[in-house]
Structure formats: structure tokens, C-alpha cells
Image: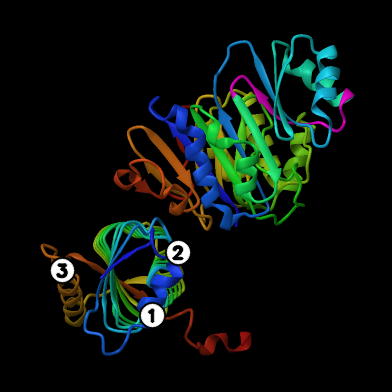
């Protein structure tokens, strides 16, 4: 089914997708003429496939559950923010805070993601085929971030338990983020993510692993007087 | 919030459509700044003739024209709503003195050999219509839609700010050291007409340009001297430049084709531009100055 943002209002289109009849079998949608609209495909909560042709604005596919959203273009701030499940695939570049606070699902960005990618992520898997900007994975709590390009300044600042894998260079690591030893289970995790996001010709062992030194958020008896 | 937009034409192809392109961009940024709007257009650069963009407020145009032509001989005036473009061969210093000492109700919005500036309080769509931006041609232009935060909703508080010949600046963000910087620049001879933080940044740029620094070098040293959040677009007679602070919370997106470069706070501001879907689209990186034509 084709949905044209030049003919229908954003709210109308979101409403159609958010309130799809459970028994409906036709679950393939194509959205044309997005022209940078904000909050397109936000709050979808059923199995469906949506292809957006063109560039979109802020919070695209935010709070996504179960749906598979592909954007054939660039996305603005906060794509797939607070996603719970499903997949969001960006074929172009993503602006800041991609996948912010997302709990689950898979976010794949073919191009670059700018600053604060995966900020406070809580279980989502984020795969960026290009590079990520500064302060990516800031306060990231769980889930996995896989970067095939480079990472900007202060990667993983104040990190909790997200696994970060970067193939290229890291400009600098944030507070309490350190390089860690790559074990078999991590290589398996990378392999699975590469396969899921249809990336070939990159070997899992070409990545480096970064994680929390666990000094910042763990209770430390030496600091008892400060609590 | 606030929305900023800019367009620089690399070829002559769209010169007649510049106003139309810019007005579409401003209209689409209404959601980011509904309080006031303004724009600067660079057009018909002259070697000798100076253009003064004046806001005459509630003065009667005909009586103003009668009075001012007594003092500035051979001045040519064109009225667009409550703004007047005054063209003269006289030097800026003399004209500014005449206006300031004889017409306290008139404010000088900007001047130069190419720039024309219009700004007013109200919804961007109304402001654009009122000043007939659609009908403008030109080589480059900059616009702003304002959501007022640190100073009042007035014409003086509207952007673009012009503090030097053919210069202008628009800003999305806020500065935290503008009061100190205003004092320092005032001591150096800069004059400020509002309490607004952006006017201080514009003054900073003017001061540096007058010391023969390039726009690119000026904005690069601004990264050190201007404390706060910002995306700036600064215009000169020959082109413009954009810079974001190192933290880069304030958005900006650039679309470049073989005919033009467009900058806006959000992509939706430029979704209507010709060939935009095949343009090179990217975000300016934090702390790096991008410039065209300078």
C-alpha cells in the first residue's frame, strides 16, 4: 500500500499504521514524499514492513515495537529512539542521538551516525556501517554497538554494560571506558550481528572491543565516606 | 529553538529565484521560531552606491522621505512595508550620523553595497509575505525564525544582526559570556543597540573582520572566545560560513548541488529546493568552520 505525504497528513498516516487491523494480511507499506517530516512511523506496535522513500526528520520510528522500518534516505535526530523490538534500517546517514535509550530490536545505519549515537541505550543492537560522532554510547547500559568505521571523541563515557566494537580508530575514550580483551563469545556476537545486518567481507576479528572499567558505577568500599 | 536558513548560489541559474527559495525555507521553519523572522539578501552589488536598510516603524514614509532628502541629497528611497531601502553615494559614517541625530524613531537594520535586511516581529509566514521576499533576486541570502529566550520579542531582538558593512549573522542557541564580551567590544569601539547575545557575536565578527582577519579565521577563533551553544551562519558580501560549537547540540544540515549550497536547522526547510534529493547532504561537524565564496 502506498502512502503519500503530499496527499495525506502525517497524523493520518501514522494513525493508519498505529491502528492496523490485527487480522489484516496486507502489511507492506511504502511512504513517499516524507520531505523531512518529524515523528514519522513513531509508535508502531505490530508486525509490518514500511519503506520510507526520501529523507525524514526527527524521531523516525521512535518507540518501535515489532515493525520493520526501512528509510531510503537520511534521518534526523533520534531515529528509533526508545525502540523496544523490530528493526529500523537507515540507508543514508543518521543525525545525533540515533537509537537513544532503545531497549531492544536492531538499528542498522548504512552511512554515518553523528554525535551521541546510542546514548543511554538499554538493550538495543546498533550497527553502523560508517562512523559515529562524539560521545557515542554515552551512559549506555546494555545491548551492543558495532561500528565498522571510526568513533569520535569520548566513546562510551560513563558506560555501564554495553559491549562496543569498533573496527576503525577511536579518537578518544570517555571516562571509565577501556579497551577489553576479545573472547570467543564476543566474536560470535559480532558474527551474528554482521550476518543480521547483511554485512559481508568484514572479519569479526578486525574489530576491537571496548567496555566499562566498572570503577565509576560500582560500590567501592574505599569511597564509603563519600556516600 | 530558533530556525536558521541560508542559501548561496554557486552559479547564476537560480539568481532570479533566490527569494522564492529562501521564503520557502523560512516558512518551513515556522515551527522552530514563531515569534519573529528576518532575512538578509545580497543583491546588485555596486562599487559606489551604499544601501541602507531602515526600519521606519510608525513614521509616515512620505514625510520621512521629504525630510531625509533635504539632508541627504539625491538619496533614493524604496518602501517595503515598514522598511525602507535608502540608496546614496554618501559615505556610511555621514549617513548613520544624520539618521541617528535627526530620526530617533528610525532604526538602521544594516547597510552595505550589496546587503538588504528586513526583520520584524510576527509569524515568519506573515513577515515573509509582508516584505515580499518571493520577489527578490540575489546571489546569496540568510534567514532566521526566532523563538525568543534571553531578550524581548522586538524588532531589535530579531535576527539577522548586522554590525558592519555588508555583514550579517544569524544564530540558533544562546551565549553565556555575552555581557563580558559586550563590555570588551564596547571599549574597542563597537556599538550595540540591544541586550541580545547574538548582536554581541555579530559585533565580535565585525571587530575581527575589520582587523583584516578572514571570516573563516574569525569564526575559528570565535570557537574559543564565544561560550555557549550555537550554530551560526555569518554572511559577507562574497559568501557565507557556518559553524557549530564543539558540543553541537544545535542542529544544522547542509545540502550542496552544483548550483547552490543550502543550510538549515532541519532538512524539512529545504525539502522544496530544486534537485535537493540528488544533493550531497551532510551535517557540519562540531567545531569546524565551513565557508563558501569568501
Mark 1 neighbour class, 10 Å CA radius: few under 14, some 14 to 19, many 20 or more: some
Report in which chain the residue with disc 1 lies: A
Foreground mark, 2 or 3, reads: 2
Could you tell me which chain the residue with mark 2 belongs to? A
Please report, as a chain letter, where disc 3 is located: A
Mark earlier in primary sequence (1, 2): 1
Determine crowd level at label 3: few under 14, some 14-19, many 20+ residues with C-alpha closer than 10 A: few
Labels 3 and 1 positioned on one and the same chain: yes
The residue under the point 19% across, 70% down is A197
Q: In the depicted view, which residue is nearer to us: B20 or A89?
A: B20
Q: Please tell me whether residue A120 is drawn above or below residue B128 in the rendered image.
A: below
Q: Which residues are magenta?
A: B102-114
Query: Could you say where residue A37 lies in the image, as x and y percent from the top left?
Result: 43, 61
* Residue occupying the point 63% across, 46% down: B226
- Determine whether, in the image, residue A146 is placed left or right of residue A161: left
Specify which label sits upstream in the sequence, 3 or 1: 1
Query: To which residue does mark 1 refer?
Result: A18
Q: Is residue B103 magenta?
A: yes
Q: Give x and y (percent) for residue A83.
A: 38, 78
The residue singled out by tag 3 in the image is: A198
Is residue B38 part of the magenta span, yes or no? Answer: no
Q: CA distance from mark 3 to mark 1?
A: 28 Å
Residue that label 2 marks:
A38
Q: Is residue A220 rendered to the left or right of residue B38?
A: left
> Is B19 rendered above or below residue A14?
above
Residue A144 in view of the camera:
no
Label 3's element? loop
- In the figure, B29 relative to B137: above or below? below
Amino acid at each position: 500500500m502506498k502512502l503519500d505525504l503530499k496527499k495525506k497528513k502525517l497524523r493520518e498516516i501514522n494513525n493508519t499504521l498505529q491502528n492496523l487491523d490485527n487480522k489484516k494480511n496486507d502489511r507492506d507499506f511504502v511512504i513517499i514524499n516524507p520531505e523531512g517530516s518529524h515523528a514519522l512511523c513513531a509508535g508502531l506496535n505490530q508486525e509490518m514492513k514500511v519503506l520510507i522513500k526520501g529523507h525524514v526528520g526527527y524521531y523516525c520510528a521512535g518507540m518501535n515495537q515489532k515493525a520493520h522500518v526501512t528509510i531510503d534516505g537520511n534521518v534526523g535526530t533520534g531515529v528509533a529512539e526508545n525502540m523496544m523490538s523490530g528493526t529500523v534500517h537507515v540507508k543514508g546517514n543518521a543525525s545525533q542521538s540515533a537509537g537513544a535509550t532503545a531497549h531492544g530490536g536492531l538499528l542498522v545505519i548504512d552511512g554515518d551516525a553523528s554525535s551521541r549515537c546510542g546514548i543511554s541505550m538499554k538493550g538495543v543492537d546498533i550497527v553502523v556501517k560508517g562512523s559515529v560522532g562524539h560521545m557515542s554510547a554515552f551512559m549506555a547500559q546494555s545491548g551492543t554497538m558495532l561500528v565498522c568505521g571510526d568513533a569520535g571523541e569520548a566513546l562510551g563515557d560513563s558506560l555501564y554494560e554495553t559491549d562496543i566494537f569498533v573496527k576503525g580508530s577511536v579518537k578518544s575514550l570517555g571516562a571509565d571506558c577501556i579497551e577489553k580483551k576479545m573472547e570467543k563469545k564476543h566474536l560470535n556476537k559480532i558474527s551474528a550481528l554482521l550476518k543480521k545486518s547483511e554485512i559481508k567481507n568484514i572479519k569479526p576479528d578486525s574489530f576491537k572491543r571496548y567496555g566499562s572499567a566498572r570503577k565509576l558505577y560500582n560500590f567501592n568500599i574505599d569511597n564509603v565516606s563519600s556516600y | 529553538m530558533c530556525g536558521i536558513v541560508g542559501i548561496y548560489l554557486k552559479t547564476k541559474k537560480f539568481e532570479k529565484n533566490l527569494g522564492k527559495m529562501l521564503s520557502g525555507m523560512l516558512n518551513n521553519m515556522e515551527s522552530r521560531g514563531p515569534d519573529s523572522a528576518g532575512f538578509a539578501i545580497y543583491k546588485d552589488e555596486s562599487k559606489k552606491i551604499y544601501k541602507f536598510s531602515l526600519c521606519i516603524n510608525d513614521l509616515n514614509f512620505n514625510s520621512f522621505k521629504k525630510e531625509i532628502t533635504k539632508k541627504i541629497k539625491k538619496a533614493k528611497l524604496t518602501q517595503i512595508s515598514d522598511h525602507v531601502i535608502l540608496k546614496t553615494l554618501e559615505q556610511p559614517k555621514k549617513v548613520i550620523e544624520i539618521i541617528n541625530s535627526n530620526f530617533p524613531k528610525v532604526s538602521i537594520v544594516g547597510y552595505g553595497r550589496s546587503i538588504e535586511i528586513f526583520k520584524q516581529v510576527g509569524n515568519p509566514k506573515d513577515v515573509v509575505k509582508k516584505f515580499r521576499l518571493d520577489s527578490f533576486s540575489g546571489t546569496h541570502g540568510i534567514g532566521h525564525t526566532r523563538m525568543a529566550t534571553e531578550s524581548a520579542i522586538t524588532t531589535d531582538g530579531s535576527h539577522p544582526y548586522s554590525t558592519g558593512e555588508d555583514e550579517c549573522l544569524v544564530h540558533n542557541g544562546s551565549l553565556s559570556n555575552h555581557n563580558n564580551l559586550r563590555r570588551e567590544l564596547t571599549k574597542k569601539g563597537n556599538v550595540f543597540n540591544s541586550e541580545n547575545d547574538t548582536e554581541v557575536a555579530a559585533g565580535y565578527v565585525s571587530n575581527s573582520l575589520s582587523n583584516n582577519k578572514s571570516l573563516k579565521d574569525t569564526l575559528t577563533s570565535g570557537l574559543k572566545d564565544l561560550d555557549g551553544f550555537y550554530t551560526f551562519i555569518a554572511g559577507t558580501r562574497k559568501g557565507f560560513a557556518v559553524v557549530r560549537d564543539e558540543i553541537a547540540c544545535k542542529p544544522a544540515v547542509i545540502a550542496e548541488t552544483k548550483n547552490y549550497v543550502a543550510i538549515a536547522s532541519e532538512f524539512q526547510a529545504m525539502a522544496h529546493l530544486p534537485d535537493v534529493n540528488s544533493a550531497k547532504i551532510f551535517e557540519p561537524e562540531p567545531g569546524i568552520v565551513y565557508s563558501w565564496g569568501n
